[in-house]
Image (spheres, coloured by chain):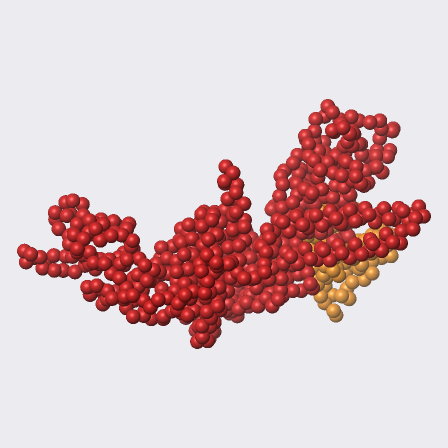
Chain colours: A orange, B red
Amino acid sequence: MTKSLHVTFRVGTADYALPAADVLHLESFEHATHVPGVPSYVAGLVQTRGRLIPVVDLRARFGLPPIEHAIDRRIVVVQVGPRVAGLLVDSAREVLQLDGDSFEKPPEILDHQSAGFVKAVATVMKRLYLLVDVPRVIGEELSHG
Amino acid sequence: MTERVDLQEFVGGFVAEAEELVAAASASLKEIEAANAAGTTRPKSVRDLFRALHTIKGLAGMIGVEPIVELAHAMETLVRAAERAGGTLRAGAVEVSVQAVQAISERVRAIAEQRTPQPAPESLLAALAATDASSEQPSAPPPIAKNWDARLSQGERQQLFVALRAGTPGWSLTFYPTEEKSARGISIATVRTRLAEVGELIKVVPRTLKGDDGKMRVAFDILLTGPTTAEALAEVVAATAAEVESIALAPEPAPAPSDEPDSDVTPMGRATVRVELARLDDLQEQLSLLIVSRYRFEREIARLHEVGQDVRRLREIADVQARQLRDLRRAILRARMVRVTEVLEPLSLLIRSLARPGLKELRLELDAAGAEVDKAVADRLLPAIIHLVRNAVDHAIEPLEERRRADKAPAGTIRVTCREVGGSQLELAISDDGRGIDRAAVARKAGKPIENDEDLLDVLTAPGFSTRDVVTQTSGRGVGMDIVRRIAVADLGGELTVHSELGAGTTFRLRVPVTIAIIDVFSFQCGPQAFVVPVAAVEEIFELSKSSEVLPPTRGHGGEITVSLLARGDRPLPVVSLGALLRIDDGRRAEKAMVVRRNGELLAFTVDRMIGRQEVVVRPLEDPLVHVAGIAGATDLGDGRPTLVLDLAELGAGIRERTRA
């Protein structure tokens, strides 16, 4: 019964969702300053709305090959605790009301393959939405280092 | 040539001092105004005002800024009169004085920005001369020849009166045009022009009279002041000197002796030393060197301890030293601080100049409590605040009539508050009680929906965006909202937010650091991107010539990084490609090498080419995703994109490992 707003976006062939409450805003993607020596899935630094934020390339993070010309790419700016980071996605689709009850744990068989990046899966109108585990994606292990 | 350089050196000092004096002058004016409102007088404030003006005049004279000298002089004359009149400077005189201080302030700004200051406005100089310090109404009219008295307006009478009191002679004469004169080129037009050259025309009145032949003729009665002679004037109107009447004041009671002679006027009585910001920067740089050498010292203690030496006494000394260094750093930071109240001082002048009595009335509320801010931050921040205030007056505050209809207080209130948050940041709020921003209208103009304040700010701060098609006089110049955002965000590493309620008003909030790390850097290109390094970290930059480089033996295929050697001076210098080190080498031929010192050893990094040298604000990279050894932070070189600040010495640390096959 607990419906809440989710921002949905696409990476590769899959649709992903994030609670709108965790999303600060969306930005179009033009350029990120490469930072030498960071993990390969970090696209670089971007300056937006007064913040200097690291951007995680979700294609790289999710093991997909890079795409060269993508005009729809967006940065989903998320906040996790004190950290603010950007998620680079292929396209950001829409904001949806998703029913909390429709989410279920991803099949166990995916545990290793998806490295825990997917927290839950919802099927809405025969369409799959994967709920992203943001702390995992932006490297929660790094926060304690 | 050297003279020019000297002058340039003066200018920095002049601007700093003049700005302070302008702030002091407007503070005095406010005190005087408050006293007037309370029906009392503040002779001390009038004296302070006089001193500030006198000093400004002297300084401006020193570097030859005539418009400021003229303005300060005219004001000084007025204020001196007020001082002699027992410290009374009435509302009218305060009003004119405020305008004059504003005009001086604008010209000081111009000099600071290396523009040529505008000439002193004639109308303002005339108004200053025409204003009587101590009386609201003109005092006893001076004895004026002919029937001038009845024909002069109050302002004209004042103008004459003040000039006469200042010792400038006044003259009354009549020009009778004739055909014969006109044939010689003497007409009322040429007379006016020539008279304006020798003095200040106060009034020219035509009248008719019956000529010798019984015909009606026109004559012009002319009243002027100026350091000239009856003969010279007579010549202009083709009359005789006897027909030119000199006007003088009845002798005044002897002025009360002023409490100190003119030459003894000291600039401000406070125990203050003005220091150029660059010197404080220098001090800070020296301090960071001291901190570096302290680390060396600590390492040495640790090494001694490792080899079994007793280092307890050394440790104690080192601990005391560490504390002293911390105190020293705090003291230097304190020395850079200025009170926000003083920084915001020019706003009261601004508000006055923007108000239109009877049409748009304004009230300024300032509340900065005891907040202090780094002078470097203050200098960057003020233009942004001024723009926000201008914008508020221009776009937000409704005209008097509209406010009345909306049941609002007649005077629009601009409120600027400042408070410290968390000890290291300032929050400034610039609010107005105007009409608020119409989101729907802005959305239409921008062509995209606006759902919240963040969207609104995005649109407002988009370059070139204006809610008005007609650029108004006040907000059409200077910086736009995009620049306000740039100052707050990119330059100062702060935040800008807006909250607006239709009909109730708008608040812009700026959150900026109390102090910022501004460093002098070299910028250069390496591979596909630009970087900067602190100038202080670079020992030398030299042109590469491949011929002198030597490639020492490499084992097997060598490692990821190759170090070559170069004869530099009388020592071998290791050279490494920065592009290779950062894994961004794009195969371009490096042109330059930068030498840094690492643990006492020199090391050169090759880069594609140097871009330039500039001062930048460094922002730390705090997120663990981008926390990398050798990268000290990021800055904005003006393109809105982050540029990395490198710590070359630290980057050099990992080289040996990476040369391994």
The x, y position of residue A74, in whole percent, is 67, 51
Instruction: Establish if B205 lies above or below B403.
Output: above
Query: In the drawing, does residue B109 fall left or right of residue B429?
Result: left
In screen coordinates, is A37 left or right of A51?
A: right
Residue nearer the viewer, A103 or B320: B320
Looking at the image, which residue is at 78% across and 43% down? B650
**Residue B581 drawn above or below residue B259:** above
Q: Is residue B560 visible?
A: yes
Tag count in the figure? 0
Q: Is residue B527 visible?
A: no
Task: Locate residue B463, reporting x and y percent.
Answer: 54, 51
Residue farthest toward the top in the current orientation of the protein: B547
Quarter of the image where one finds residue B591: top right
Along the line of sight, the residue nearer the viewer: A12 or B330: B330
Residue B345 as seen in the image, left or right of residue B279: left
B622 or B11: nearer the viewer = B11
Occupied quadrant, residue B578:
top right
Q: Residue at x 69, y 57 (%)?
A: B331
The outermost residue toward the left is B213
Q: Quadrant of the N terminus of chain A?
A: bottom right
Q: Residue at x 55, y 65 (%)?
A: B416
Q: Quadrant of the C terminus of chain A?
A: bottom right
Image x and y of residue A35, in percent: 73, 45
Q: Residue at x 17, y 56 (%)?
A: B243
Q: Position of residue B561 (x, y in %)?
A: 80, 34
